Image (cartoon, coloured by chain):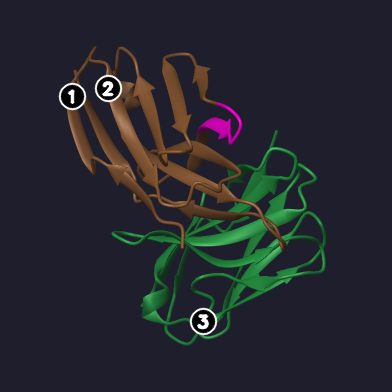
Amino acid sequence: KQEVTQIPAALSVPEGENLVLNCSFTDSAIYNLQWFRQDPGKGLTSLLLIQSSQREQTSGRLNASLDKSSGRSTLYIAASQPGDSATYLCAVNQGGTGGFKTIFGAGTRLFVKA
Amino acid sequence: NAGVTQTPKFQVLKTGQSMTLQCAQDMNHNSMYWYRQDPGMGLRLIYYSASEGTTDKGEVPNGYNVSRLNKREFSLRLESAAPSQTSVYFCASIRGRTGELFFGEGSRLTVL
């Protein structure tokens, strides 16, 4: 059974710091991995999607890497800003008959201090 | 682009009342999902529909029913609401080619 773990559960950093959020999964047979951002009281916004054949994806100050063999993904945020404060969720997608099955991590709550 | 639209955004029910959460997507996706999100429990799959005309149970289906009305719409019904169903409900659809998930803004339900 696929399990997705995110470490740390919470993180507080000063503005401007570079930071790394970690996601690990137990079954390497994945279709893709997706990182989301969730602001309090809001829905999930997709940040980056990495297909199983890819090693990394970049969008602006965000870079996500994927190492399927070790069951790990990292989300790197450069030059953090107070507006980056949110919960970041990692989701692993496994394909199969009947459609995709997505397993979510519990999230990392990030607070960036001005 | 509207993406995934959920209604209502907020609802308060009394125990035993029924209601339906509506979800529609305009991205021509085949697969749609209903999740609930609770503090400390993360996102849990209630039901999903891999394609129009099919529905399947997820991790926590008890107390819910679903209808895939057409390719665009996937509704979630609570027949007799219970306080344990107080939660935030999210509808999502998936782009089949890439497996990318898209979420609605959520429906916040309180059952008294």
The answer to whether mark 1 and mark 2 are in CB contact below 8 A is yes
Give the image quarter of residue B98.
top right
The chain assigned the colour green in the figure is B
Up the image or down, B79 lies above or below A99; here it is below
Q: Secondary structure at mark 3?
A: loop
Residue for badge 3 = B62
Give the image quarter of residue B102.
top right
Residue type pointed to by label 1? Val
What is the chain identity of the residue bearing mark 2?
A
- Whole-angstrom CA distance, mark 1 to mark 2, is 8 Å
Q: Which residues are magenta?
A: A47-54
The residue closer to the viewer here, B62 or A67, is A67
Please name the residue shown 24% across and 44% down the image: A9
Percent across and percent down for residue A8 are: 23, 40
Residue for badge 2 = A19
Up the image or down, B56 lies above or below A6; here it is below
Q: Are marks 1 and 2 in one subunit?
A: yes
Q: Are marks 1 and 3 in one subunit?
A: no
Percent across and percent down for residue A109 are: 27, 39
Residue for badge 1 = A13
Q: Secondary structure at mark 1?
A: strand
- Neighbour class for label 3 at 10 Å: few (<14), some, many (≥20)? few
Figure quadrant of the N terminus of chain B: top right
Residue type pointed to by label 2? Leu
What is the drawing colour of chain A? brown
Please name the residue shown 34% across and 45% down the image: A107
